[in-house]
C-alpha cells in the first residue's frame, strides 16, 4: 500500500499520487507484475536484505522500465514491520543503451561487410557474406540480391533466397514486375503490407501467397545505372523501421561498390589475358621475323659480299695486269668500280653490325674505360696516322657497367667520326674525358669525345643518329651513314644514352652515358651491428653472413665505439637493438643520420 509521498505534483504510471495514495498496488498494476513483486516482498521479509531489480510495467500502451529497490522497514524493537520501496523510471536510459547496442551492432556488421569485400573476390561470395551479416542486424525471414540485365529482360539471383527462388535462378523481368515500374520506382521501395495493395505484380502475389507481408527493395546503383536490388521480406506487416531501411540502404551502397570493383577486376583480368595472348602472338611473329632476319643477314654476309669481293678483285687485277692498255678514262672507270665496291662492302658491314646489336645478348659487366679506349685507338690507328691527329685522353678514367665488345665498337665509331669531319688541311684534334652526374641515386659517367670539326646545326643533331642519315655527300666525307646509329643503338642496348653538343661551324662534343661501377672494395656493404648483448650479436652476425657474402660488419657494444664510428662515417647500413643500455634504437638511428641518408 502506498502510504507516503515526496512531492506535491508527481505522477506514478500516469496517475497522480493523490489518486493512488492509500491504495494497494493490485489496484493499479497488472496481475503478473503484482505476483512478481509479492515474491520479492517475501524475500525481503524473510531475509531482511535489500533487493534491487528492474521491472517492466505497461503505461498508456507502452512498456516503461523501472529500477526498483526494496528495503526492510525495521521498527523500534528491531523487527521487520514492512517494506520501503523506491522505483526510478529508467526507460529513457534503457532506450539509449539499446540504441548504442544497435549502433555498435550495425557498425560491426558494416565493418564485417567491408572486410568481406576486401577478403573475397567474386560478387556471389561478397553478397552472400553481406546478406548473412545483414540478417544479424535487420530481422527478416528472407533476403536476396538480384542483378538485372535489361537488354535480355532478365534478372538473376546472385545471393540469398526470395519467394522460393535460390542462387543462380534466372527469370524474365516481365514475368515478375513491369520493367517500367521497376525503372521508375524510388531507390528505397518499401511496402508495409502487400495485402493492402490494390494492384500487385506477379512477384508480389507470389510473396503474399507464401505468407510475406512486409517488402523492402533497395536499388544497387553501379556507375549511375540501376543494375540490381537488395530485397528483404518478412511475414509481419510494417516490419521494417526507418532505421532498418537506412541500414539496408548503406549495405546496398557497399555491395554496389563491391560488385563494380569485382566487375572491373574481371574486366581487367580479361584485358590482361587478351593482352598476354596478343603479346604471345606478337612474340611468335617477332621470332619468325628474327629468324628471317638472321637468314637475310647470312645471305648478305655471304651471298652479297662474295660478288663484291669478286668485282673488287677482278677490277684490281684488270688494273694491274692490263692497265697499260687503258687510257685515262678507262682507268678512272676501274678506280670508280673499286671505290664503289669498297663503299658497298663497308655499307654491308655496317648494316650487319647494326643488325647484330639488336640480336646480341647483352650482359653488362665491369668495363675499364682506360682499356676500352686503348683498344678502340688500336682499331683506328691507321686513320689517326693518316690525319696526323692529336689525341688527348684524361688520366684515370672510371669503370662503367657495359658490354665490352659493344662499347669498343661505339668508341671506334665516335673516334672515326671525330677524325673524319674536319676542314681540309686542318689537323684533327680529339679530346677524351669524363664527367660524373647523379640521377635517381645512380652515378652516371658521361664520356665526351670532343673534336675540332665542322660542327652540326641543332636541327640536325637527332637526325644524324638515324640509319642512312647523312648531312654531307660521300665524295666530301666518305662513310655509310650508319656509324652514329650504331652508337645510339649500342647505348640503348646497354641501358645508357648518347647525344651531341654542337653548333654549325664549331667543334662538336659527342657523349655517351653509362652507369658508374664502384671498385670491388666500395661494392662491399659496410654495416654497423649495434647490440650490447653478445649472444644476440652472434646470432644476427651468423644470419647476415649466411645471406650476404660481400658484407663488412663492425660490431658496436658501447656508446664510445658508436661515437667513433659516427665520426668516421664509413658505413652504409645500421642494425641496432631496440633497447640498449645506453640508448634507444631510435636514438641510434637518428644519431647515425641513416634515416635522412635513405629518405
Image (spheres, helix red, strand yellow):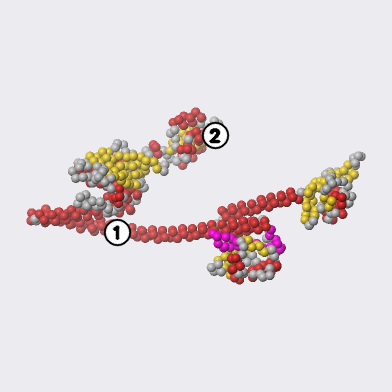
Residue drawn at x 89%, y 51% as measured from the top left: 23
The question of residue 234 being in magenta is answered with yes
Identify the secondary structure beneath mark 1.
Answer: helix
Mark 2–mark 1 distance (CA, rounded to whole Å): 68 Å
Checking the image for residue 584, the label placed there is 2
Residue labelled with disc 1: 295
Residue 457 seen in the figure: yes
Instruction: Tell me where the magenta segment starts and ends, as one range.
Output: 219-241
Frontmost residue, 71 versus 377? 71
Residue drawn at x 20%, y 50% as measured from the top left: 476
The question of residue 35 being in magenta is answered with no
In the rendered structure, the answer to whether residue 498 lies left or right of residue 111 reads left
Frontmost residue, 134 versus 583? 134
In the rendered structure, the answer to whether residue 275 lies left or right of residue 367 reads right
Binning the other alpha carbons within 10 Å of mark 1 as few (below 14), some (14 to 19) or many (20 upward) gives few
Relative to residue 516, is residue 591 depicted above or below?
Answer: above
Residue 444 appears at what percent x and percent y? 37, 42
Residue 358 appears at what percent x and percent y? 33, 53
Residue drawn at x 34%, y 47% as measured from the top left: 497
Amino acid at each position: 500500500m502506498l502510504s507516503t509521498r515526496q512531492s506535491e505534483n508527481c505522477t506514478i504510471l500516469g496517475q497522480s499520487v493523490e489518486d493512488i495514495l492509500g491504495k494497494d498496488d493490485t489496484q493499479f498494476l497488472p496481475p503478473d507484475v503484482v505476483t512478481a513483486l509479492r515474491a520479492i516482498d517475501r524475500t525481503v521479509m524473510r531475509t531482511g536484505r535489500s533487493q534491487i531489480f528492474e521491472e517492466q510495467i505497461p503505461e498508456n500502451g507502452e512498456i516503461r522500465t523501472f529500477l526498483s529497490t526494496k528495503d526492510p522497514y525495521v521498527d523500534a524493537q528491531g523487527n521487520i514491520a514492512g517494506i520501503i520501496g523506491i522505483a526510478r523510471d529508467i526507460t529513457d536510459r534503457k532506450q539509449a543503451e539499446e540504441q548504442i547496442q544497435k549502433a555498435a551492432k550495425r557498425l560491426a556488421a558494416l565493418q564485417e561487410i567491408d572486410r568481406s569485400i576486401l577478403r573475397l573476390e567474386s560478387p556471389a561470395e561478397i553478397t552472400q557474406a553481406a546478406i548473412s551479416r545483414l540478417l544479424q542486424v535487420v530481422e527478416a525471414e528472407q533476403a536476396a540480391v538480384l542483378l538485372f540485365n535489361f537488354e535480355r529482360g532478365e534478372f538473376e539471383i546472385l545471393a540469398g533466397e526470395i519467394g522460393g527462388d535460390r542462387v543462380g535462378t534466372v527469370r524474365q523481368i516481365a514475368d515478375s514486375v513491369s520493367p517500367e515500374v521497376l525503372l521508375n520506382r524510388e531507390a528505397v521501395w518499401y511496402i508495409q503490407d502487400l495485402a493492402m495493395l490494390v494492384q500487385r505484380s506477379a512477384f508480389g502475389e507470389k510473396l503474399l501467397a507464401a505468407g510475406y507481408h512486409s517488402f523492402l527493395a533497395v536499388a544497387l546503383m553501379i556507375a549511375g545505372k540501376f543494375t540490381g536490388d537488395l530485397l528483404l521480406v518478412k511475414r509481419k506487416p510494417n516490419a521494417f523501421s526507418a532505421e532498418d531501411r537506412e541500414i539496408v540502404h548503406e549495405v546496398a551502397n557497399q555491395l554496389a561498390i563491391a560488385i563494380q570493383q569485382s566487375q572491373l577486376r574481371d574486366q581487367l583480368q580479361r584485358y590482361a589475358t587478351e593482352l598476354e595472348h596478343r603479346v604471345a602472338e606478337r612474340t611468335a611473329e617477332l621470332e619468325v621475323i628474327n629468324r628471317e632476319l638472321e637468314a637475310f643477314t647470312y645471305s648478305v654476309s655471304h651471298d652479297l659480299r662474295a660478288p663484291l669481293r669478286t668485282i673488287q678483285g677482278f677490277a684490281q687485277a684488270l688494273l694491274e695486269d692490263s692497265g697499260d692498255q687503258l687510257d685515262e678514262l678507262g682507268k678512272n672507270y676501274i678506280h670508280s668500280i673499286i671505290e664503289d665496291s669498297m663503299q658497298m662492302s663497308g655499307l654491308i658491314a655496317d648494316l650487319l653490325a647494326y643488325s647484330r646489336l639488336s640480336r646480341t645478348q647483352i650482359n653488362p659487366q665491369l668495363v675499364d674505360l682506360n682499356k676500352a679506349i686503348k683498344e678502340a685507338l688500336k682499331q683506328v690507328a691507321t686513320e689517326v696516322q693518316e690525319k696526323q691527329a692529336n689525341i688527348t685522353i684524361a688520366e684515370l678514367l672510371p669503370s662503367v657497367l657495359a658490354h665490352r665488345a659493344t662499347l669498343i665498337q661505339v668508341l671506334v665509331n665516335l673516334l672515326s667520326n671525330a677524325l673524319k669531319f674536319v676542314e681540309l688541311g686542318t689537323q684533327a684534334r680529339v679530346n677524351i674525358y669524363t664527367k660524373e652526374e647523379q640521377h635517381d641515386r645512380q652515378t652516371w659517367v658521361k664520356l665526351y669525345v670532343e673534336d675540332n670539326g665542322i660542327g652540326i646545326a641543332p636541327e640536325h643533331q637527332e637526325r644524324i643518329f638515324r640509319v642512312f642519315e647523312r648531312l654531307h655527300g660521300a665524295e666530301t666525307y666518305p662513310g655509310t651513314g650508319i656509324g652514329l646509329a650504331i652508337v645510339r643503338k649500342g647505348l640503348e642496348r646497354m641501358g645508357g644514352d648518347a647525344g651531341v653538343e654542337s653548333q654549325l661551324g664549331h667543334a662538336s662534343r659527342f657523349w655517351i652515358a653509362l652507369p658508374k661501377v664502384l671498385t670491388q672494395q666500395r661494392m662491399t656493404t659496410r654495416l654497423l651491428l649495434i647490440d650490447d648483448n653478445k649472444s644476440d650479436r652472434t646470432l644476427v652476425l651468423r644470419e647476415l653472413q649466411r645471406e650476404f657474402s660481400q658484407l663488412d660488419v663492425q660490431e658496436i657494444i658501447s656508446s664510445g665505439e658508436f661515437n667513433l664510428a659516427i665520426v668516421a662515417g664509413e658505413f652504409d647500413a645500421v642494425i641496432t637493438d631496440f633497447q640498449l643500455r645506453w640508448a634507444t634504437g631510435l636514438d641510434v638511428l637518428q644519431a647515425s643520420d641513416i634515416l635522412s641518408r635513405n629518405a
